[in-house]
Image: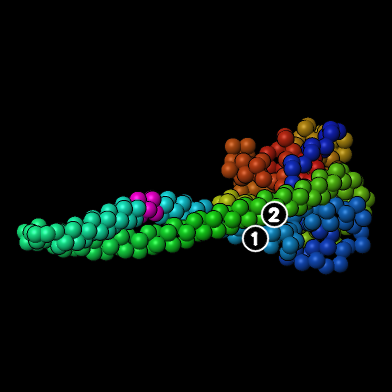
Amino acid sequence: MTTRHIRARARQPFTAAVIAVLATILTTTGTPTAASASVPSVAQKWSSLMYHSLTPTPAYLQLRKTLSAQRKSLATWSDRLVQRRTTHDAAQNTLTTAVATDAAARTRYALARETLATARNNLTVASQQRPRNATAVTKAKNAVTAAATTTALRRTQASAAAAVLKTAQTAASTATGNLDAAGVAWDRTYAAIVTNQRRLKTADAQRAADATQASGLSRDVVSQVRKAFTNADTTSVNGTTVHRNVAYAYRAMLNAAKADGVVLSGGGFRTKQRQIELRKINGCPDVWRAPASSCRVPTAIPGTSLHELGLAVDITSGGRSLTRDSAGFRWLSANAGRYGFVNLPSEAWHWSITGG
């Protein structure tokens, strides 16, 4: 059981991207409803700003979804680029070999045709010589036959090499086209990601600006709520009674902590009469005038505690008040600012919208 220590000190700033809610129009489930007539306009403005800083629009959610899909697509195209570059390089190597093989085959075929032509000329000469030399004619005929056989073989080899070259050219052309297409797709996807990241950054900056603007109103919220506060302005969140102004943010904070394995609860709103009782229980020298630090447990003077407005919570974990070495305190120190809650330095368990 603890209290706030109200001090005359500068308000601690919220951390970046403070998150809160349209609290004056939130029910216990976070569904907008009619705002309490007693909640001042500054509190409603604070709630509206914090709600917008917390609640992503459908367009924002779609943008994040699109970015996620685009990043996956970019990874896929990156893999394809590697694969297609490997295929392209292999196809180019095959084409280079095929070109050389085709050239050599055509050269051998050309030489074989020249040899055949020479053999036929020699046969003609041998056949026309007088007196006729049968041995020379036979030899020339044999040479023609051998040359013709070689020429036929070289023609077949040249034809095969040409077919291989054509296939290699087609494969190389296809590989080049596929590689170029993958490169274009990668470039387009990357460009789209850059554009959408810029849009997301702009949207995040606007949400952060809303939170910053809201945080600047927090002290005014406290002073104005104090003037018009009624018990009807509170609601219960997971068993903790808080001002409707902070209900959604508080619930979101508890849910986020739970998702990280830290279960939090706490004591929020208490009446002025209960504050008086606590002053007496905690041994304050004077209920109405003694400073909070003079009590056995720091306890604010009745009428000054944010607990009396439901704008502060003494947070517990596992039924125990937080200490600075507790997991709950470490989590809140790292994350509470995003939900609009600031710690009172003298009390590890005490968190409010102003840190007071």
Callout 1, which amino acid? Thr
Most common SS among magenta residues: helix
Q: Residues within 10 Å of mark 2 (few under 14, many from 20)?
A: some
Depth order, front residue of 121/149: 121
* Residue at image location 69% in from the left, 54% down from the top: 196
Callout 2, which amino acid? Asn
x, y percent for residue 264: 63, 51
Res 66 label: 1
Q: Residue furthest front?
A: 130
Q: Residue furthest left?
A: 135
Q: Are marks 2 and 1 in contact (CB under 8 Å)?
A: yes
Q: Which residue is mark 2?
A: 196
**In the rendered view of the protein, which quadrant contains the C terminus?**
top right
Q: In the picture shown, does residue 156 fall above or below 356?
A: below
x, y percent for residue 332: 66, 44
Magenta residue check for 131: no
* Residue at image location 69% in from the left, 46% down from the top: 336
Depth order, front residue of 114/344: 114
Q: Residues within 10 Å of mark 1 (few under 14, many from 20)?
A: some
* Residue at image location 58% in from the left, 43% down from the top: 327
Q: Is residue 294 visible from the viewing direction of this image?
A: yes
Depth order, front residue of 290/21: 21
Q: Tell me which colouring the rendered structure shows.
A: rainbow
* Residue at image location 79% in from the left, 56% down from the top: 52
Magenta residue check for 95: yes
Pointer 2 or 1: first along the chain: 1
Secondary structure, mark 1, is: helix
Q: In the picture shown, does residue 27 fall above or below 201?
A: below
**Residues rendered magenta in the picture:** 93-100
**In the rendered view of the protein, which quadrant contains the N terminus?**
top right
Depth order, front residue of 267/294: 267
